[in-house]
Image (spheres, coloured by chain):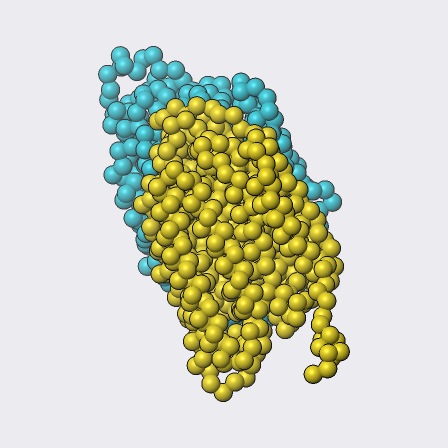
Chain colours: A yellow, B cyan
Amino acid sequence: MDIKEVIGTIELPKISLFLPELIVLITAFVLFTLDLILGSKQKRWLLPSLSVIGYVLALLSIVVSSQNWGDTFYGSFTNDPLGAIVKIFALIIAIVMLAFADRYFTAKKSFYGEFYYMLAFTLLGAMILASSYNLIIIYVSLELVSIGFYILTALLRGSFISKEGAFKYLILGGLSIALASYGAVFMYIYAGSIDLREILSYEGSDYHYLILGLVFFLIGFAIKIGAVPFHFWLPDAYQGAPTPVTAFMASVGKLAFFIPVVRIMPLVQEKFSLAWMLTVGVIAAATMLYGNLVALVQKDIKRLLAYSSIAHSGYILAAVAVTKEIGLKAVIYFLVVYAIMSAGAFLVVALLERAQGWSNEIQDFSGLRFNALFLAVAFMVYMFALLGVPPTVGFVGKTLVFMALSFDKLWWLAMIMIVSTAISTGYYVRLVVIMFMKDREKEILPFPKGVTEVVSLVFLTIMTVALAVFPGVIWGLIEPASELLFAR
Amino acid sequence: MEILRADFPFISLSMILPVVASVFVLALREELSKWIALLGTGLTFLLSLVVVFSFDYSKSGSVQFYEEYTILQELGVKLSLGLDGLSLLMYFLTTLISLVAILWSIRDEQISFRLKEYYVAFLLTETFLVGVFASFDLLVFYVFYELTLIPMLFVIGVWGYKLRLYSAYKFFIYIFFSSLFLLLGIAGVAVEHFFDFGRFSFSYFDALKNSYSLGLEIFLFLLFFIAFAVKTPIVPFHTWLPDAHGEAPTAGSVVLAAILLKMGTYALLRFNVGLFPNATYELMPMLITLGILTIIYASWMTIVQNNVKRFVAYSSVSHMGFVVTAMFLLNEEGLRASIIEMFAHGMTSASLFMIAGFIYHRLHTFNMESLRGSLRFMPLFAVVVATTAFAAMGLPGGSSFWGKFLTVLSAKEYSYYLAFLVLVGAFFSAAYVLYMLKTLFLDFREESILIHFQDVRGFKLSAFVAVIIPILLIGFFPHIFFNMFEGSIDFFLKLFEGLM
């Protein structure tokens, strides 16, 4: 081959398409370097502020990257509206979460600089995962997110629960990635391509490899999103992780891990749609029922929220079963708003953990209204949102899922969803009832709250209601995302 | 349905007023909260009077004072508020009873702590209830329908009697569970509109144009029906009601019984009958049977109650049985009976719960037996009790007479057996009222215990007067009220023209 021909095929990467990722990558390396150089006093304020600056810049650069959609790096990186939504909300939640981190780790006496750069790398992984059809890029970014989460989970070095959770997560996470990559191999055998779009539109003669590949690939992701029966790591990891990290895992983690599944949705061919609907539907039904039933008997608030997270995976999967445009919209909306609700709920817990004598037991919430009115009201809003009471985002999410299910006449799944939501009333409303209607059982001393923490929490709480009352804000992003995905 | 746009946003104003008042309640001192709440509900009531008098009764079948604000174009969600004759009556009921509830609470000893939250809960309930009765968008209706749960959860759970936590919990779970079916049904209607017309729409007017296969229509009907049957409540879905109504503070029970139950019956008529006429026609025998069952079963349960509040609660269920039976007879008299009974029961149940609350103040018990002969020393209160009780019983000149009388008339059009069953129900409801009157008025009791009893006066008397005036008005001049919703009845009957 002539050297000129080889040079001619080299395509220069278009920076404008992956600018947010680039900025987060640079931030991560800067944080990493500074963590090695600086003394611990300077780290305390420099690392968080640099992280925030980096993430805000990345958030602003989405304006640039959203000027033109398209592929770069030979089609292995795709910048499209779906990815943009994920990036916007992942960055916002990361910024909000940072407000809580320093005080939390100080109170737990385990401040480590690793937190900031591991967070940045995890965020980077999530952002890349959300914008690729390429199996290898998906594999690499999945590893990046997962390794970040393993380390972040184990960050409370003195705590046994933290280590246990991280170890369980590591083992099952490893299994999940092995399965996903095994599935990727079968898909490559089928179509001779590593691009999901080409694989799923390839009209090959032997479907078995594709089905086998898809099944393994999806089981891999089912483990990551905590779908029953692959959920065993999730409650332990969520309970063990430092609570701000749990907030990040439950929101950004879930958002990122769902996106490859969402990208497959519109590509499921006519031949598979029934099998897809049944498989995903049954997993969804099992997940939501199991998550809610087990959450009912939890005594630890973090475990309760973890099981509620499993249940929400079920609700979202129910909409994934509907491979129509309305199903896709429901999935994207629910994912984004679940990220906000769960982040808010976990961050309230993160604040409360700093109070003296707090042990994360449900009973500790008794009469919280009298001790910390603001936190009680915020937590109530999140509980009602997770339950799906209007006018919160959780309600709009559930409505969209119901619309999707009735679009495909999946009445049985809708009925199971109704029953499992009714079960969930048991624990969400119980929390509200004991916070507002019981007397104090334990004296919780008032503790200093940072301005940034209060502002962040108010912001999340307002978003929880505002995105439901003015859904147009978020709909403006979802509409082009789903249209573009279905146009292919 | 014809739509007449509003020149002035009366409805949104009467929804905003209580919210503004609750902001003031939260911002100002606690002692002022009751007066601000009184002012807020009072102004809203005056506004509703203006609406009632400027309503065009010659076009009571069309939606008047209509306002529309788009929430989400792509899914066809609009905040569309308006009043036809039926909604108007319910809207008036809401503003009146909200005022009565606040009037009562001012001198209620049970309400001695967390006053700000208490009055905010009632003010917000008023806003949400106006939203329920004025919404002509299914999703927005659902939003307000659910929102009423939250303040009521707090009212029962914080200021209620002994079993308050259990009752609040039960109330929320029952209603929330059942209304999830409604949400699925609403989603189904919006999606059906997409299949017929190519776009999603939650609008009531658009939903009227949908066409369904009979199977799907019955399925959607049942989804709606489960929610409203629990709310109404229809036996066997009534078990939450005695607990919630029995343990709530007096004003809470008043709002629950007088307005929140009407949400169920209003919605049955508006949505189940209005949107799914074929299914309604197919299921008519079942629905009437359930209605009659409700009347008779609840009447029996009423007679054996020892607790005055539970007594009133069960009597509410039996009254709702009349409303449901009359509604699903699907003829002119039936619908008229059903709607007038909704309003009349709002007045009598409010009065009865206030009577129960008043007795509790004096004796600190709800036990029927310990009340024997207690009325002899409170003449004014005795008049109130007698008026309300006879009105609730269905004596001519009282408010429930027209409901029961017209139900019997319309049942007669189908068969005399049916009319006889309704009469049996009416007999039992007379029986329990007479039993109560006998216990309160005629039984003997040592005079020394009761001699220091104080008669009803002040704000509490005004609360009683506010409900007794409409009771007598309905009894003696029913045509004032019948005129209000004549057009609505025509609208519903037109849906069944081809079927009957």
Is A23 or A374 nearer to us in this picture? A23
Q: Quadrant of the N terminus of chain B?
A: bottom right
Is B82 or B58 nearer to us in this picture? B82
> Residue drawn at (56%, 19%), measured in percent from left and top?
B29
Residue A357: give x, y in percent of width and height: 38, 27
Give the total number of marks visible in the rendering: 0
Q: In this picture, is B103 found above or below A97?
A: above
Residue B388: give x, y in percent of width and height: 41, 33
Is B484 or B35 nearer to us in this picture? B35
The reply to whether residue A197 is visible in this rendering is yes
> Residue drawn at (69%, 56%), measured in percent from left and top?
A19
Is A111 or B121 nearer to us in this picture? A111
Q: In this picture, is B22 found above or below A266?
A: above
- Farthest residue to the bottom: give it: A205
> Residue drawn at (35%, 47%), measured in percent from left and top?
A164
> Residue drawn at (35%, 15%), measured in percent from left and top?
B453
Quarter of the image holding residue B197?
bottom right
Q: In this picture, is B246 found above or below B414?
A: above
Quarter of the image holding residue A220?
bottom left
The reply to whether residue B229 is visible in this rendering is no
Residue A283: give x, y in percent of width and height: 40, 64
Residue B236: give x, y in percent of width and height: 32, 52
